[in-house]
Amino acid sequence: MTKLLTIDTSSKNASISYSIDGSLIDEKSWTSKNNHSIELSENIIRLTEKNNLNVNDLNYISVALGPGGFTSIRVGISFAIGLSKFNKIKLLGLPTFEIEFEKVNNLNQRDLIALIPAGFESYCWKSIKNISNRNVDGIFARKDFKNIFKMGTFFGEDTNELAEMNSGHNFFPDSKREPKLMVDLSNKLINEKKQEKYYDLVPIYSRLPNITKKRRKNE
C-alpha cells in the first residue's frame, strides 16, 4: 500500500493531496495570498486531522520543484524535507512542467508547449520535445509572444489574456494544475521503478536568483 502526500506551491495556485495506491482520498487547492508558508502548514494540518492521517504512515511525499515563484517553490520543498526528515519518508521532486504535461498525456502531438507565469507579465515555457531536460526552454515577455512563436499548441495556467492577445495561435483553455496530476505522475514513476531519478530536490527557477553581494563597510 502506497500512501502519498503531494505538495505544489509553484505559483499562487497551490495545492496538496492525500492518496492511497493512486486513488485520491482528499485534496485542497487554494489561491495563495503571498503567504505560502502559513497557508501550507494550516492546510496540511487540516488534511491530516480530517483523514486521521499520521504523517509517520506516509510512504512518499511528492513536491513540485518549479519553475514558478522563487520563494513559493522553496516553501514547498523545505516543508516536504522537514516532514520527511524525522519520519523517514521518501521524497520525490517533480518538475512543474512534467506535472503540466500530465494534462495532455493522452494527446499524440509533438507541438505542445507548456507555459507557467514567471512574473512581470512574462512566462517561462517548455516544449514537450525537451521534457527530459529539467531546465526551462526559455522565458518571454507577454508582448513578445508573436516574435518568438510562429506555431505550436499552448497551454498552462493564467493564459486567457495571452490567448486573447494572440488569437491566431492555438491555445487550450486556461487550466490550473489539479492535485490528481501529481498523484498520477508520482504513482506512475513508483510503479515503473523510475523514482530514483526524482530524488533530487534542487529547485528549478524561471530566472537565476538575484543575489546581491554584501557591501563592505568602506564601500
Image (cartoon, grey):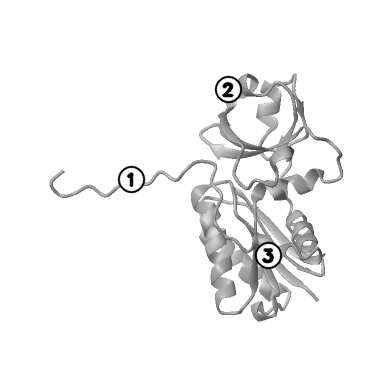
The residue beneath circle 3 is: 196
Q: Which label belongs to residue 48?
A: none
Is 140 left or right of 156, judged from the image as shown?
A: left
Question: Height in image: 172 above or below 49?
Answer: above
State the separation of the CA atoms marked 1 and 2. 29 Å
State the separation of the CA atoms marked 1 and 3. 35 Å
Based on the displayed image, in which of its 4 quarters is residue 90 positioned?
Answer: bottom right
Label 2 near label 3: C-beta < 8 Å? no
Question: Residue at 69% across / 40% down in the picture?
Answer: 130
Q: Earlier in the sequence, mark 1 or mark 2?
A: 2
Q: Which label belongs to residue 143?
A: 2
Is 133 left or right of 209, judged from the image as shown?
A: right
User: Does residue 71 appear in the picture of this structure?
Assistant: yes
The residue beneath circle 1 is: 212
Q: Please state which amino acid type lies under the numbered disc 1.
A: Thr
Question: Height in image: 55 above or below 188?
Answer: below
Residue 215: x percent and y percent? 22, 47
Q: Nearer the viewer, mark 3 or mark 2?
A: 3
